[in-house]
Image: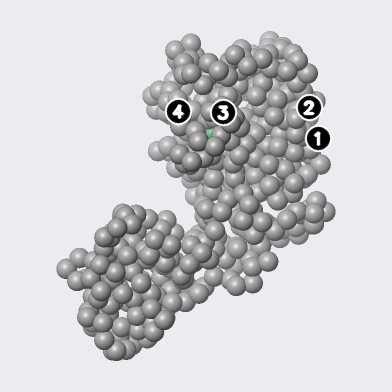
Amino acid sequence: MAWRFMVLMKHSASRFLCTESYLRCLQQEPSPNLPTASVVICFHDEAWSTLLRTVHSVLDTAPRDFLKEIILVDDLSTQEYLKSSLSEYISKLPGVKLIRSNRRLGVIQGRMLGAARATGEVVVFMDSHCECHNGWLEPLLERLASDRSRIVSPVIDVIDWKTFQYHHTMELQRGVFDWKLDFHWKPLTEHEKKVRPSPVSPIRSPAVPGGVIAVHRHHFQNTGGYDSDMTLLGGENIELSIKAWLCGGSVEILPCSRVGHVYRTGMPYNFSDEKAIERNKIRIAETWLDSFKHLFYQHDRLACLISKAEKPNCTARIQLKKRLGCKGFLWFISNVYPELRPVQDRQGFSGKLYNAGLGLCVVAVRGLLELSPCSDNINQYFEFSSMKEIRFGSTLELCFDVRHEEIVLQNCTKEMENSAQQWDIKENGMIVHVLSGKCIEVKKTDICLQKCNKGINLVWQLNHSYPLDMR
Ligand code: UDP
Ligand code: MN
């Protein structure tokens, strides 16, 4: 978060969340023998107000007995106020240390530097624009005390970066990621909510968010920490989460722990950051995804290009994986996050839609469907879903639909009954529109509906670009 956010945050008293479950959390007595924590805050050109807000909110809320220290890691900031003024200010705060790096490390390596200096039993990595709430630390320590191999995160509330308005996250959510290896929050389903022992029980999650996580320090170090060949920021939380799950640990979001984070909506990464993120993601794919990495490359063409050009070296990480005896990614998909399982693996196909008559493939161009020579372009990537939809592209939010007998892309309606977006794929290569009983045909350059007949322009081949050698 850049230095320009010099707005003072409002006082935290106004942010007290008064829901039944939060009150239930505050009533819980923490165990007396919790491990101690070092809070590591790595920053680069953070605003004075947000940085110190983060530090003071930790000091104000973390019980003295459990807070060993706060370690600030200055990742080569350039702003004047972060130099001697900051050193002077910090020197007056007991238990707060400031480490300066003389080269730009990025948050991943910066956090590792902080962890190497930490002396608490637990390390909490925290972004430099956060606001902690009463009782946030204890649940994290509690879960790590009973199992060192866990990685835990608070519920993250959203602080608007422009107005500093505070939005409490009310829904119970899991941390997940998609085939682009981007992190998302996903609300629990009604069924998942029902089977929970209590509304404040830990939420088993495929992934932790990046902003605030707690790990047992020795366990973190002994299992290879973050991937030290990752640069700047991005993807490290996904890597850490996959590693935890595959190598005998687990990942949880704890509803009783709450921290606000200033999100950078509207302030995109610059291009060099974006390339660094892609390279980090490539390292995840090459180290952990096994033969599923093809799906990542299909969904992220930039990563595919970079990976081909640069051939990343993940040998050290792959050796670590062997040394720790980690399971394969198929186990993760089968046991931790089945929703990630590719649609065509459950039913149907994914890949290119090849018209036998014309020898061309369907391509989506700015929301329209056209035909063009077949290629590995993501715009020729479709998936047949278990709801009989033909979905397009990386987001898979657009579906084949019909308008005036022409096949078009529309937002997927996800309706089960009487949907114009449902298709049957026949063994003879015909694709039948369920509602009308007509077939998809190519007429000149148009893709449209036609009464089914034996014409070659009605025959489609569905390419399986998905690897079959899943181990
Ligand atoms: N950061 C850093 N060095 C960098 C980039 C980021 O120390 O090269 C710090 C940044 O100050 C913040 C944390 O890393 O404390 C995460 O970055 P940011 O908040 O920009 O990421 P986001 O939360 O937007 O994903
Ligand atoms: Mn952040």
Q: Residue at x 59, y 45 (%)?
A: 206
Q: Quadrant of residue 244?
A: top right
Q: Amino acid at mark 2?
A: Glu
Q: Residue at x 58, y 50 (%)?
A: 337
Residue 279: percent from left, percent from top: 60, 54
Q: Amino acid at mark 1?
A: His
The reply to whether discs 3 and 1 touch (Cβ–Cβ < 8 Å) is no
- Earlier-in-chain disc, 2 versus 4: 2
Outermost residue on the left side: it is 404
267 lies left or right of 37: left
Tag 3 residue:
198
Q: Amino acid at mark 3?
A: Ser
As drawn, 275 above or below 290: above
Query: In front: mark 2 or mark 4?
Result: 4
Tag 2 residue:
121
- Earlier-in-chain disc, 1 versus 4: 4
Give the CA distance from mark 1 to mark 4: 34 Å
Residue 103: percent from left, percent from top: 68, 39
Q: Quadrant of residue 234?
A: top right
Dot 3 alpha-carbon crowd within 10 angstroms: few under 14, some 14 to 19, many 20 or more: few
Q: Quadrant of residue 116?
A: top right
Tag 4 residue:
170
Give the CA distance from mark 3 to mark 4: 15 Å
Judging from the image, what secondary structure is the residue with disc 4 in?
Answer: loop
Tag 1 residue:
218
157 lies left or right of 42: left
231 lies left or right of 47: right
Residue 129: percent from left, percent from top: 54, 26
Give the CA distance from mark 2 to mark 4: 31 Å
